[in-house]
Image: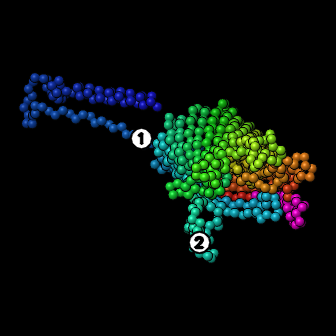
């Protein structure tokens, strides 16, 4: 940068000198040493001019030539008609829509500002997601996501983006102004009455907020970028950290992100605040012990991408989820060291190798794609448990006179593996397979936490270039304590749309652990949480298979700004679930067999984006 400044200064000095020299030379060529002006028709020096009526002995010098001012061209954003996908991370679009939105020039004004609008209404229906015929869990809901965004590419150094997002459920709000049915038809955000008898502040969820609000500072010809504010983080295939755009409410983080790019190298370093336990500046936090939530928490990390060749690229990452120590609510003022939990630090580190090296797509001419991703988790939960080598099965500590005689830190020890490959024999067709392993915990009471924590990965995935890189569309089973075998077929028929078929077989990684959906642990399978029934013949038999699932997805883009999506999932429970639905000791015959092995999920949505 300093070299460029020096070169510009030298150029300015040389240009100014030449320009000034030309002016002096022109003036000397038309003037005498005495300074009097001489015209081409003037007589030689010393001659007497003939008398005329209006003759003056000293004529005024001619006016200097006008100097042309250099007018600097106003800045024109290079993103006009070529908007980077980096600034569309909040959107779920078909490939045709993505191309149309990125190449559009109509919504740019002053060659710096770009506006946009997205509307995504969705209908969802789920039947028997817990495989239990006694629970009333069937749902039919309509939701709507609305986004309006503004991108300002002010100059080559500064860019900002604001995305206002409103997500609401149809029929999910009412106004307290009346008691009859008319209160449901009034507009939303009409106000809410709170019971203040407890004299406590109440955090209120607002369906309208900023999904993105960041300033991007660019330096050294965009080789260095600093993004400040609310933003979406996504790395690789989004299995660990992703936008999670299939959900109506996706991921977003408040923090800083530094990007360094040189050639085929790209390094991202970020730090975000996930949770704050204290109220501030009149704002009421929804977190903290007072709200039965986590206290101060932070998510930081780094992701390094390198393209080694046209057929191979690598991601290396290290992410840390840190939850600060929690002071015991019964601790006296003078003893702030009395903690209910020490600092919880979960470290996730791993790599991803792939031949999808062109913005996560295959280079031209390639028909075979492959990806290998592996990750590990370590760190400490902040809890202390009994020393593991002194424990008998099913115990957490050894107690004498009410005190644990020995204890140790409880540590994270989990791992994850994803293997994916596919082949396109002809351009519109791809056939692929995928295997995902997410570890489980055979003993959830010992000093090791071995169940994989999926962090902020895509929970459900449909659409995009690689829809099968995420999980299923139902969300009934997710990547924790699971071995997921899947086959996928994708056919792009052009104007008639994209057809995708995905088949999953889910097995438990550890039989003693439970099974998990996209929201976390589910109570409803055969388990042995403390691993003490291995030699107990009368104990419940632990099943291996969680479920099987078939997903059918259809996407069509009848107009470049409008797409229609539909998806159907069929699930059938395996022995790990059906065995848990049998309880012959229950005196109520209706509750002895509660298994309903079939479950379905359906969604239909339209996406309008400009």
**Percent x, y of residue 163:** 55, 52
- Our reading of the magenta stretch's main secondary structure is loop
Question: What residue range appears in magenta?
Answer: 582-601
Q: Which mark is residue 73?
A: 1
**Percent x, y of residue 28:** 23, 26
Location of mark 2 (residue): 176
Q: Is residue 594 magenta?
A: yes
Q: Within 10 Å of the Cα at label 2, are there few (<14), some (14-19), or many (20+) other Cα atoms?
A: few
Q: Which residue lies furthest to the front in this view?
A: 401
Q: Can residue 461 be seen in this view?
A: yes
Q: Decide if residue 301 is on the left or right side of residue 592.
A: left
Mark 2–mark 1 Cα distance, whole angstroms, equals: 57 Å
Give residue 425's quadrant in the image: top right
- Residue drawn at (86%, 50%) of the image: 543
Q: Which of marks 2 and 1 is nearer the N terminus?
A: 1
Q: Which residue lies furthest to the bottom in this view?
A: 180
**Percent x, y of residue 599:** 80, 58
Q: Which residue lies furthest to the right in this view?
A: 537
Question: Which secondary structure lies at badge 1?
Answer: loop
- Residue drawn at (19%, 27%) of the image: 31
Q: Indicate which label's residue lies in the foreground, 2 or 1.
A: 2
- Residue drawn at (58%, 41%) of the image: 270
Q: Within 10 Å of the Cα at label 1, are there few (<14), some (14-19), or many (20+) other Cα atoms?
A: few
- Residue drawn at (60%, 33%) of the image: 265
Is 220 above or below relative to 436? above
Q: Decide if residue 575 is on the left or right side of residue 3.
A: right
Q: Can residue 93 be seen in this view?
A: no
Using the image as rendered, state which of residue 380 and residue 307 is in the foreground: 380
Give residue 357's quadrant in the image: top right
**Percent x, y of residue 514:** 79, 51
> Could you tell me if the residues under marks 2 and 1 are in contact, i.e. CB atoms within 8 Å?
no
């Amino acid at each position: 940068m300093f070299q460029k400044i020096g070169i510009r200064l030298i150029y300015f000095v040389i240009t100014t000198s030449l320009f000034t020299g030309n002016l002096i030379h022109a003036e000397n060529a038309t003037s005498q040493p005495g300074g009097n002006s001489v015209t081409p028709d003037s007589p030689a020096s010393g001659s007497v001019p003939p008398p005329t009526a209006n003759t003056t002995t000293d004529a005024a010098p001619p006016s200097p030539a006008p100097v042309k001012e250099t007018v600097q061209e106003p800045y024109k954003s290079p993103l006009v008609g070529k908007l980077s996908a980096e600034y569309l991370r909040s959107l779920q679009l078909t490939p045709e829509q993505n191309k149309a939105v990125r190449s559009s020039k109509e919504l740019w004004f002053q060659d710096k500002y770009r506006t946009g609008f997205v509307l995504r209404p969705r209908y969802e229906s789920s039947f028997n997601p817990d495989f239990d015929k006694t629970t009333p869990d069937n749902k039919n809901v309509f939701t709507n996501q609305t986004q309006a965004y503004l991108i300002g590419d002010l100059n080559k150094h500064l860019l900002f983006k604001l995305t206002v997002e409103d997500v609401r459920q149809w029929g999910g709000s009412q106004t307290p102004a009346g008691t009859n049915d008319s209160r449901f038809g009034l507009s939303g955000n009409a106000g809410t009455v709170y019971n203040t008898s407890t004299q406590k502040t109440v955090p209120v969820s607002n369906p309208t907020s900023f999904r993105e609000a960041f300033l991007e500072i660019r330096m050294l010809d965009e080789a260095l970028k600093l993004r400040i504010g609310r933003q979406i983080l996504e790395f690789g295939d989004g299995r660990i950290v992703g936008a999670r755009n299939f959900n109506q409410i996706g991921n977003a983080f408040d923090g800083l992100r530094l990007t360094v790019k040189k050639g085929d190298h790209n390094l991202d370093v970020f730090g975000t605040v996930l949770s704050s336990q204290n109220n501030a500046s009149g704002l009421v936090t929804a977190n903290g012990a007072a709200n039965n939530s986590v206290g101060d928490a932070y998510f930081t990390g780094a992701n390094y991408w390198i393209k080694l060749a046209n057929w191979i690229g690598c991601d290396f990452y290290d992410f840390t989820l840190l939850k600060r120590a929690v002071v015991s609510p019964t601790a006296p003022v003078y003893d702030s060291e009395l903690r209910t939990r020490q600092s919880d630090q979960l470290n996730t580190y791993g790599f991803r190798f792939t031949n999808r090296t062109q913005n996560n797509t295959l280079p031209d001419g390639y028909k075979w794609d492959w990806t290998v991703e592996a990750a590990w988790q370590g760190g400490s939960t902040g809890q202390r448990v009994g020393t593991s080598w002194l424990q008998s099965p099913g115990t957490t500590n050894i107690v004498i006179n009410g005190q644990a005689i020995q204890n140790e830190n409880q540590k994270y020890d989990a791992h994850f593996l994803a293997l994916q490959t596919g082949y396109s024999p002809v351009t519109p067709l791809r056939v692929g397979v995928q295997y995902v392993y997410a570890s489980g915990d055979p003993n959830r009471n010992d000093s090791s936490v071995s169940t994989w924590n999926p962090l902020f990965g895509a929970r459900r995935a449909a659409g995009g270039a690689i829809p099968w890189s995420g999980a299923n569309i139902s969300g009934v089973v997710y990547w924790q304590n699971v071995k997921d075998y899947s086959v996928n077929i994708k056919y792009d028929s052009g104007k008639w749309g994209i057809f995708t078929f995905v088949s999953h077989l889910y097995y438990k990684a550890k039989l003693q652990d439970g099974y998990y959906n996209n929201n976390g642990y589910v109570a409803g399978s055969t388990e042995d949480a403390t691993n003490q029934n291995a030699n107990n013949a009368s104990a419940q038999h632990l099943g291996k298979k969680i479920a099987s699932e078939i997903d059918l997805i259809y996407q069509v883009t009848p107009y470049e700004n409008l797409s229609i999506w539909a998806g159907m999932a069929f699930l059938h429970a395996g022995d790990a679930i059906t065995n848990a639905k049998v309880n012959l000791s229950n005196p109520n015959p209706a509750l002895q067999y509660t298994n309903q092995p079939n479950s379905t999920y359906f969604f239909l949505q339209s996406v309008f984006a400009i």
